[in-house]
Amino acid sequence: MQSLVVLVPLALALGLLGLWAFMWSLKSGQYEDLEGAGWRAILDEDPPATKPGDPA
């Protein structure tokens, strides 16, 4: 019973921290473009390869 005095407020604090982090991510636009990152990973073109003697 003694541990509940510590664990219940700790659980509530962690829950509120998670809720705050989620709300912050919504406000900062983290979920605006859900498909864009996936398509950028698929359609990403490799930079042109340079030969050893080519200038940089």
Image (cartoon, rainbow, N blue to C red):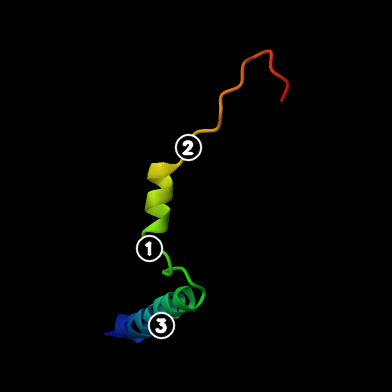
Question: What is the x, y in percent for residue 21?
Answer: 45, 75
Q: Is residue 40 above or below residue 53?
A: below
Q: Nearer the viewer, residue 17 or 40?
A: 40
Nearer the viewer's eye, disc 3 or disc 1?
A: 1
Whether residue 27 sits left or right of residue 1 in the image: it is right
Secondary element at image label 3: helix
Residue at x-position 44% and y-position 78%: 17
The image's mark for residue 49 is none
Query: How many numbered discs sit on the rendered protein?
Result: 3
Instruction: Give the residue number, with chain letter if any, for mark 1.
Output: 34
Residue at x-position 55% and y-position 32%: 47
The image quarter in which residue 55 lies? top right
Q: Earlier in the sequence, mark 3 or mark 1?
A: 3
Quadrant occupied by the C terminus: top right
Instruction: Give the residue number, with chain letter if any, for mark 2.
Output: 45
Q: CA distance from mark 2 to mark 1?
A: 20 Å
Question: What is the x, y in percent for residue 39?
Answer: 38, 50
Q: Is residue 28 above or below residue 53?
A: below
Instruction: Give the residue number, with chain letter if any, for mark 3.
Output: 16
